[in-house]
Image (cartoon, rainbow, N blue to C red):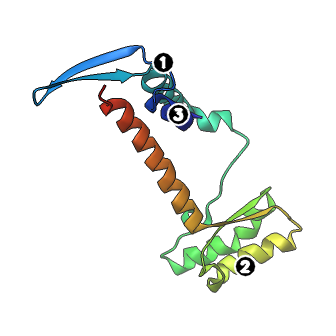
Amino acid sequence: VILLILELDAVSVLPKPVVYVSYHGGELYTHRKGFLGSIVCPTIFVVIGVFWQDIRRSQMVFVDKFCINQTDPELKKAGIRGLAGFLKHSERLVVFWTASYFTRLWCTYELVSWIHLGKSRICFVPVSFCVSAATMTLGLFTHSMCSSVFQAV
């Protein structure tokens, strides 16, 4: 929603109540900055970022790659043994899949444990898709911010 508002603001679809005038290199530029893009969107972004855990209190995330020690073999072994406990109390398994996913035994163990527990909600998300989505989101955000700040009339 925020990205949509910023994009609409950047292409001058939304009203532009604030006008900035600057003089650069002998040229006079007028920059129009919308209220939604300059006040509402950053405010919503900060509020959601700060209070997200309170808003979605019942939802917890276990990211095995970060929660299981990757360097100490004994701690890693203990973490892998505890996977079934985390999976038992989970509602959904999201697998960020790469071609090497099934070459790691503990990833296969995690998936087989999920199936053995009788769970059915599995979502496979290719990592390449995540990188593309993040790149597009960052690109749209950057375009929106730059367009609304540097748009000369």
100 sits left or right of 144 in the view? right
Q: Are marks 2 and 1 in contact (CB under 8 Å)?
A: no
Instruction: Name the image quarter holding residue 152.
Output: top left
Relative to the observer, which residue lies in front, 135 or 111? 135
Q: Earlier in the sequence, mark 3 or mark 2?
A: 3
Q: Residue at x 80, y 55 (%)?
A: 91
Q: Residue furthest top?
A: 17
- Residue at image mark 3: 50
For numbered disc 2, what is the local secondary structure?
helix
Q: Is residue 9 left or right of residue 55?
A: left
Q: Residues within 10 Å of mark 2 (few under 14, many from 20)?
A: some
The quadrant in which the N terminus is found is top right
Helix, strand or loop for disc 1: loop
Q: Which residue is mark 1?
A: 15
Q: Few, some or many C-alpha atoms within 10 Å of disc 3 (few <14, some 14-19, many ≥20)?
A: few
Which amino acid type is shown beneath numbered disc 2? Tyr
Residue 51 point in image, percent of width and height? 58, 32
Residue denoted by label 2:
109
Which residue occupies the extreme left position in the image?
Answer: 26
Residue type at mark 3: give it: Val
Q: Earlier in the sequence, mark 2 or mark 1?
A: 1
Residue drawn at 20 percent across, 22 percent down: 22
